[in-house]
Image (cartoon, helix red, strand yellow):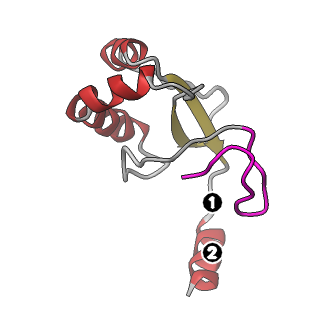
Amino acid sequence: MWRRDQPTEGRTPHWSGFTLRASDAKFSDPTQQMDDAMDFLKRYERELAVLATFPGVDTRDLDFGIEDRDVGIQGDVFPSELLLLMGRLNINLGISRFPRLLKDDAEQLRASER
């Protein structure tokens, strides 16, 4: 959670907000992320509807972290049911793309986290 104009993690945001995890699926599994997000939105639909009209909440985003694939053109299709539910709850769709880690890179990252 962060509050408008209160420094946090080296930044001073100009809006208040918080982060929720709707899926634990890997970046390489966007289909599972979408399924998990749909389940999350359905489960918490009432609470999210309240947030959609809460004074001072300027934006609501659902961001999907998707790994770049080794293809000429990368496309991901989001189910209309998910998009309709997001629209009803006034939630924006975000897509954050991440470079695919090579096996050696992933092993080095895991080693550095220990």
Question: At 64% across and 40% down in the image, what residue appears?
Answer: 97
Magenta-tinted stretch: 1-14
Residue 58, image x, y percentages: 60, 25
Tell me the tag on residue 101.
1
- In percent of width and height, residue 111 lies at 59, 84
Q: Secondary structure at mark 2?
A: helix
Earlier residue among tags 1 and 2: 1
**Residue farthest along the front direction in this orientation:** 55
Q: Secondary structure at mark 1?
A: loop
Amino acid type of the residue tagged 1 in the rendering: Leu
Residue flagged by tag 2: what amino acid is it? Leu
Above or below — where is 51 with respect to 65? above
Q: Quadrant of residue 17?
A: top right
Residue occupying image coordinates x 60% and y 28%: 74
Can you tell which of label 1 and label 2 is closer to the viewer? Answer: 2
Q: Which residue is more in the foreground, 101 or 58? A: 58
What residue sits right under mark 2 in the picture?
109
